[in-house]
Amino acid sequence: MSDPVSRVRVPFKHLFSQGANLAALGRVGWSLVAPGKREQKAMPGEQRVATLPPRGSELVRDFVSWSEGTRWDGLPPHFFPQWGLPLLAQTLDDQPHPVARVLNQGCRLTIAKPLPADEELNVTAQLVSVEVGERKVRLHQRLVTGTASAPEAVIADVYAVVPTGKGRGSGERPVVDPAWERLVSRDLPGNAGWQFALLTGDFNPIHWLTLYAKAAGFRRTILHGFGMLALATEALAVKHGPERIHTIDVRFLRPLVLPASIEIAAADGHIGLGVPDEPAAMLGTYELHGETP
């Protein structure tokens, strides 16, 4: 398909807001050069704690613009990768597994209350569990973000795997139910991964460097899983109002190769994202405040 023109301009200057994430990426790269030998420690792992300054208003504004979202009362909760990924990376420092090969498989985002944008962020990250299987290692990490006036406002449970052996998946290819209400249709350009990286600091090259993506087995660059989560969360916020969103729990089922023309649809607490007439890239559930699951 031809590459659609981006409707959003993400200034290059946002790169200079991503120092912590770039440093974390460098540490992951170094682990490939000097992996070392470690033993699996007991779980849950050590908590990593940080107090961070408020996020820049222009960075937040451009993130919401990229997500085609609405105005939040405070920080968009799905913006957590921008401040949380460095701390999450630290929780994997002592792992004996090749974490440089980690693949994000899903996320459950719980929004207890609005996250103030003008206060310092109190952030805690922890590796909750590690399950070692024949073909993969499953990781569950948790990131809790709050402020002095809104403690534990947002909780992100992140699920990932580290492939350790050969083998095929289940072969299942679920689709977004065509009967669901279409919330969003959008043309994502070929540089959508680069834009998301500038905004969040997640510079894994499979998302913005074509040659690297092809070497990793993809046809072209692919969108971040957290990018799909951001688009889906904003679609729900536009539909119901951001103050209504309580949880969104999604699984990333297949790579979303860029460029892509996508649809986001939802019904009865279920949500999906994908290219029409193709297997879903993401499926999940959501809950609204004031409603019984």
Image (cartoon, grey):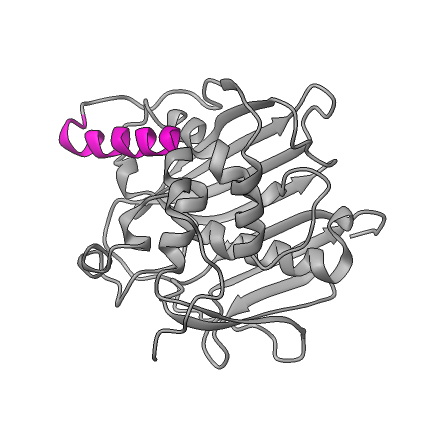
Quarter of the rendering containing residue 130 = top left
Coordinates of residue 292 in the picture (x, y in percent): 83, 51
Magenta residue check for 23:
yes
Looking at the image, residue 51 sits to the left or right of residue 35; the answer is right
Residue 63 is situated, as x and y percent measured from the top left of the image, at: 53, 48
How far from the left and from the top, in percent, is residue 99? 30, 36
Q: Foreground residue, 202 or 119?
A: 119
Q: Is residue 284 left or right of residue 214?
A: right
The N terminus lies in quadrant: bottom left
Q: Which residues are magenta?
A: 18-35
From this view, report whether residue 168 is shown above or below residue 120: below
Q: Residue at x 70, y 55 (%)?
A: 237
Left-right relation of 79 to 260: right
Residue 201 appears in the figure: no
Q: Main secondary structure of the magenta part?
A: helix
* Residue 181 location (% of width, % of height): 69, 74
- As displayed, is residue 251 above or below residue 79? below
Seen at 77% across and 47% down, the residue is: 243
Q: Height in image: 92 above or below 134?
A: above
Q: Residue furthest right?
A: 290
